[in-house]
Image: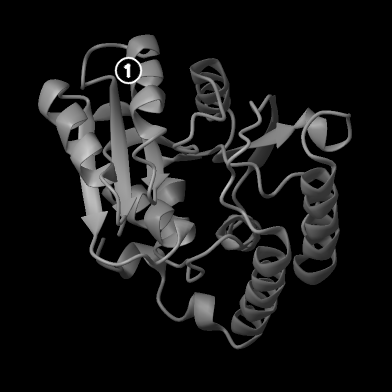
């Protein structure tokens, strides 16, 4: 079994994926027994799939999965988590926002916890767009109120899971878009999994695909959906260990 899986969820990332792949592949061990980079193409309409397939043909550490239509980042991450071969599984942004050292730091934290989540220090500092930092703080406050979780940065695009924890969480998960992070942490709390926060640094990308107003409303709607589903017992209907991968 592979030691570490790095999942890169992608939608129309043909321009940025080659640099991200080259950066991670140059940093991590050359053996596919130690690391796999799993690219999940979420129905891209550009040449993302061709870029990923080219990388996979030249490096045995790269594996590619694809959905025919776009479902959302949560769906892509869930697909990767359930297909990962690593003992530790980390997902990160395909735009290369998080350097390999940050990925390695989160993966290392899984030695002492079931789940390790990145926590960006710049949410309270002066770096990054003001509106983006404000939206992150507002969303985290809403998450605390609606789902009762204490974490300061649920939307950091760098999170890691032990393999068994990943399967327990992502066979139950339902949210396909951006609030999937909050749902995963909510489920971790319900299952009694240990979660640790790891300070990380993100490199700001000017061409982010997050649309603050629209996506914030969708996140809040999804969180209400998580809360209602939990009250209805939807997450408890089928234990994850009894479901097919």
| Foreground pick, 75 / 226 | 75
Where is residue 175? Give x, y as percent.
51, 69
Asked if residue 110 shows in the view, the reply is: yes
Q: How many marks?
A: 1
| Foreground pick, 150 / 214 | 214
According to the picture, the residue beneath numbered tag 1 turns out to be 25
Does 211 appear above or below 47? below
Q: How is the image coloured?
A: one colour
Does 233 appear above or below 214? below
Element on which disc 1 rests = helix
Q: Quadrant of the C terminus?
A: bottom left
Q: Quadrant of the N terminus?
A: top left
Does 131 appear above or below 225? above
Report the side of 156 relative to 52 (left or right): right
What residue is drawn where x is 68% and y is 26%?
200
Where is residue 45? Give x, y as percent.
30, 57
Which corner quadrant of the image does residue 90 belong to? top left
Label 1: how many residues lie within 10 Å, few (<14), some (14-19) or many (20+)? Answer: some
What residue is drawn where x is 61% and y is 54%?
210
Asked if residue 163 shows in the view, the reply is: no
């Amino acid at each position: 079994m592979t030691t570490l899986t790095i999942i890169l969820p992608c939608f129309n990332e043909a321009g940025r994926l080659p640099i991200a792949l080259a950066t991670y592949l140059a940093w991590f061990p050359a053996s596919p027994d130690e690391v796999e980079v799993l690219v999940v193409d979420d129905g891209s309409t550009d040449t993302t799939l061709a870029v990923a397939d080219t990388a996979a043909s030249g490096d045995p550490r790269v594996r590619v999965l694809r959905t025919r239509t776009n479902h959302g980042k949560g769906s892509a991450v869930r697909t990767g988590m359930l297909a990962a071969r690593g003992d530790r599984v980390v997902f990160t942004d395909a735009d290369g926002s998080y350097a390999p050292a940050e990925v390695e730091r989160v993966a290392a934290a899984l030695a002492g916890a079931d789940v390790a989540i990145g926590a960006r220090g710049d949410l309270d500092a002066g770096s990054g767009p003001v509106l983006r930092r404000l939206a992150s703080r507002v969303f985290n406050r809403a998450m605390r109120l609606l789902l009762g979780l204490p974490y300061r940065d649920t939307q950091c695009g760098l999170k890691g899971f032990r393999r068994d924890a990943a399967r327990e969480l992502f066979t139950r998960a339902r949210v396909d878009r951006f609030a999937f992070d909050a749902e995963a942490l909510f489920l971790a709390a319900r299952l009694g999994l240990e979660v640790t926060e790891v300070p990380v640094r993100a490199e700001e990308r000017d061409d982010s695909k997050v649309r603050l107003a629209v996506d914030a409303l969708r996140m809040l709607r999804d969180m209400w959906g998580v809360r209602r589903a939990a009250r209805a017992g939807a997450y408890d209907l089928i234990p994850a260990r009894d479901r097919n991968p």
